[in-house]
Image (cartoon, grey):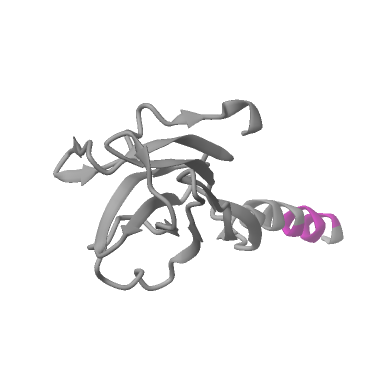
Amino acid sequence: MALFRTVAAIAFGAATSACVVFPVPRVLAPEVSGVLLNDGMPVANAEIELVAALAPSDASKDNPPGSRHAVTRTDANGKFKVGPLSGIKTVHVYGDELLGYYLVIRAGSTELIGFSDSGTGSVPSKISGSCDLAKAHKVGNQVTYCDHNRLQKLKNDR
């Protein structure tokens, strides 16, 4: 009878241990660096905000509830670096959580979405590239100013 209880306890523990939820550190948005241009000329002192959230909100609104964000400014040559953003992931048995991040550009009185990305699994550790305020790109029904396809995802740091 003791052997049966031991085997039953081990089987029950093994069957339910994968269902235990526990927090682990996680990168929610990569480090993003690059240069901000306006028709090929550097834009100095523009505000660049990296937001870790599923979908870009209207650039004029506050950040979505539960989002994380970091803000920087471009230097005299239009260069910037912001992020990465970290958080806690709650591990579940099946599948990865949906992650998303986007870049907001504020130059003067203009607020624009630089780029956005979302998916499951992990995010790249670094992204670099350039954004040009004079060159809008239509991605789905969203207009962006950093061509995400041209942004260099540095996979060797993944």
Note whether 32 is above or below 53 in the view shown.
Answer: above
Please check the rendered image and state whether residue 19 is part of the magenta-colored stretch, yes or no.
no
Report the residue that reaches farthest toward the right. 2
Residue at 49 percent across and 49 percent down: it is 76
Residue situated in front as seen by the camera: 99 or 116 = 116
**Residue drawn at the location 41% of the way across and 51% of the way down:** 101
- For the point 26% across and 71% down, the residue is 61
Residue 95 falls left or right of residue 65 = right
Relative image position of residue 153 (x, y in whole percent): 50, 30
Looking at the image, residue 58 sits to the left or right of residue 2; the answer is: left
Left or right, 135 with reference to 117: left
Classify the position of the C terminus by image quarter: top right
**Count of marks overlaid on the render:** 0
Quadrant containing the N terminus is bottom right
Residue furthest left in the image: 141
What secondary structure is the stretch in magenta mostly built from? helix
- Which of 139/123 is in front? 139
Report the magenta residues as a range. Answer: 3-9
Q: Is residue 130 above or below residue 15?
A: above
User: Is residue 7 in the magenta section?
Assistant: yes
Q: Position of residue 8 (x, y in %)?
A: 72, 56
> Measured along the vertical axis of the image, is residue 22 above or below residue 7?
below
Kindly indicate the quadrant of the structure image that contains residue 52.
Answer: bottom left
